[in-house]
Amino acid sequence: MASELMRGARAGGPDDGAVGALAATFHGELIVQGDARYDRARRVWNGMVDKRPVIIARCTGVADVVAAVTFARDHGLLVAVRGGGHSVAGNAVCDDGIVIDLSGMKGVRVDPDAGTARARPGVTWGEFDRETQLFGLATTGGFVASTGIAGLTLGGGIGWLARKHGTTCDNLLSVDLVTASGEIMTASATEHPELFWGLRGGGGNFGIVTSFEYRLHPVGPTVLAGEVVHPFERAGDVLRCFRDQVASAPDELTVVAVISRAGTEPHLPERAHGRLIVTLRVCWAGDLHEGKRSLRPLRSFGKPLADLVGPMPYTVLQSADAPSGLQNYWKSSYLDALTDEAIDTAVAHASGMTSPLSSCYFEHLQGAIGRVGDGDTAFGHRDAAFDFNILSVWPDPATSAEHIGWSRDLWTAMQPFASGVYVNNLGAEGEDRVRAAYTPATYRRLVALKDEYDPANLFRHNQNIRPSAPAFLGGVRA
């Protein structure tokens, strides 16, 4: 096995002896170029990403993570860290470096009496919710079941429960992590509290988290959820109704307004198939009778094409998925308000949507998200009212320019109304956009943490917080 690894890794980086030494102590799988598993192992969710690492290190436990970090540091390798591999930026894989793959590190342990759960970094939100809902408990998770808990948590974490229970990182109680120096640490409100502050919104800049401990809340098992679908011709009126109704919405209610193109779903009339629609997707996480009353104004507005709101298991709501392997290009910004001008601008540009798989949406925030102090976690822009997202999705790489152009044009047109960005929605957009995810004071604190825990910027293949002084790693400027 070691000799095969050496032959496969010769094309780049470490010499045969170094790779063999790693193989002799590593308990997981080491996959290199030429291995039959290589092409599958280097794929991530976004089909636009096509990168070729030197080594993919599939870890089984913390000792493997330490070994991989040490190997990367000693040999000046670029490091990509993979949890769920769902990031649109594709940072879970890299060219000519090492992928530290945590996707096989599974396991969720729920303590129903304490109302907590501890999970390993390879767990997805679908897997996490399945375990916690056995006890009628949940914490804020992502909208897509296959999203990994690790990346979403470290970047903040917005989902159906955020308005009622706060972001995912607001419900994080502690983490275990491996630092750039190979040290194993625990961070919490009482242990390394400044590091814990930075891990809640600062992404993977400070180490590799190997265990997450979350606070859980009673949720479900049944919630009131679903969607109300309107023709695109009424999009402006529907979005104004959405804006006006959510302005006084209880924390239990989350509404996302989506402009997309209808497929051939049987619940829609045939005349809507293939046409643009505007959909109000809702979740009421509270008393169902109260939820029906609260949702009445949204559901009674206009003449919808379909009203599919009803009681459903929380795990069904959380079972939504996004197909892997398609071309994905996203642009995103927060909005402090949803003005008439912003609505008219979005509707006008959305009418030129270039792919039947694309969409754009306004997600209502506030509630418990905004009641956490700006300095309490690194997650920023807590006063934002809406998260506006443009999701271009298409199958054929040859048509990429058309779809990317539509996304950029819509995003540019919406910038007069924008106020920062959610770091988990960023693609490969550069340092200025990373800075836009934080307040200036928060960014300075994050740089200070980077200087302390990763001054050589080993963990830089991410939405990177650069250390304040130039640093070198294996002869390469970080």
Image (cartoon, grey):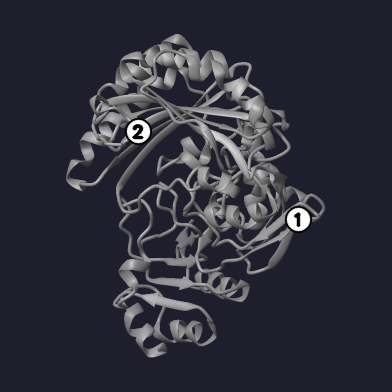
Q: Amino acid at mark 2?
A: His
Label 1 neighbourhood size at 10 Å, few (<14), some (14-19), many (20+)?
Answer: some
- Under tag 1, what secondary structure? loop
- Residue 249 percent coordinates (x, y): 62, 20
Q: In this orientation, which residue lies closer to the viewer: 423 or 54?
A: 423
The quarter of the rendered structure image containing the N terminus is bottom left
Where residue 332 appears, as percent x and y from the top left, is 44, 32
Would residue 138 be visible to someone looking at this image? yes
* Residue 461 vertical placement versus 307 (above, below): below
Mark number displayed over residue 267: 2
Q: Which image quarter: residue 140?
A: top right
Q: State which tag comes first along the sequence, 2 or 1.
A: 1
Instruction: State left or right for residue 119 relative to residue 126.
Output: right
Q: Would you call the spot at circle 2 few (<14 residues within 10 Å), some (14-19), or many (20 or more)? A: few
Location of residue 161 (image quadrant): top right
| x and y percentages locating residue 247 in the rendered image | 60, 16
Q: Residue at x 38, y 57 (%)?
A: 44
Q: Report the side of 456 relative to 258 (left or right).
A: right
Q: Residue at x 56, y 58 (%)?
A: 456
Which residue position holds label 1? 112
Query: Please, what secondary structure does the residue beneath circle 2 have?
Result: loop
User: The disc labelled 1 sits on which kind of residue?
Assistant: Pro
The number of discs equals: 2
Asked if the residue under mark 1 is in contact with the one under mark 2, i.e. CB atoms within 8 Å, the reply is: no
Between 128 and 173, the one lying in front of the other is 128
Find residue 111 and report its image quarter.
bottom right
Instruction: Please determine whether, in this image, residue 294 is positioned above or below residue 35.
Output: above
Q: Position of residue 471 (x, y in %)?
A: 54, 56
Residue 86 as seen in the image, left or right of residue 182: left
Residue at 37 percent of width and 71 percent of height = 54
Front one among 147 and 319: 319
